[in-house]
Image: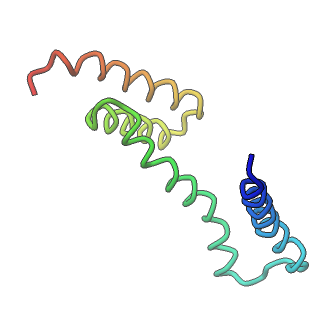
Amino acid sequence: MRVEVFLYILVMAAVTYLIRMLPLTLIRRKITNRTLRSFLYYVPYATLSAMTFPAILTATGSAISAALGFAAALILAFRGKSLLTVAIIASATVLVCELILPYLPL
């Protein structure tokens, strides 16, 4: 391998480490600003949604099955079902849709 590849990996590791380490070392006190605390509370949810939603729409053979699986997952999640139940039923919904869609006149 070329030396450049190792240099790229080293720089990437340093940047990733700094992003994780700097807040821990620079912020020693509890954050009391209500707005900042509220913002930081929702960051993981927004990040997870931004990464997951595009994958949901492109992971299946058709947009119809993706939308139906997503709708099933949303309904079950809002009803308070467990993550495993939501994942299994949403996947089963997509599977059934993928099996039925070729036979429907669209």
> Which residue is depicted at the point 72% across and 84% down?
33
Number of labelled discs? 0
Task: Give above or below for 91 relative to 63.
Answer: above
| Coloration mode | rainbow
Query: Where in the figure is residue 9, as x and y percent of width and height?
Result: 75, 56
Q: Quadrant of residue 16?
A: bottom right
> Which residue is depicted at the point 42% across and 41% down?
56
Task: Give above or below for 82 relative to 89.
Answer: below
Query: Where in the figure is residue 10, as x and y percent of width and height?
Result: 80, 59
Query: Where in the figure is residue 81, as x and y percent of width and height?
Result: 55, 34
Residue 97 is left or right of residue 75, and the answer is: left
Which image quarter holds the C terminus? top left
Which image quarter holds the N terminus? top right
Q: Give the residue furthest to the left.
A: 105
Query: Where in the figure is residue 99, as x and y percent of width and height?
Result: 29, 16
Task: Give above or below for 105 relative to 45.
Answer: above
> Which residue is depicted at the point 73% across and 58% down?
4
Name the foreground residue: 94 vs 6: 6
Task: Give above or below for 43 relative to 36.
Answer: above
Name the foreground residue: 58 vs 31: 58
Q: Give the residue furthest to the front.
A: 2
Name the foreground residue: 36 vs 26: 26
Residue 82 is left or right of residue 75, and the answer is: right
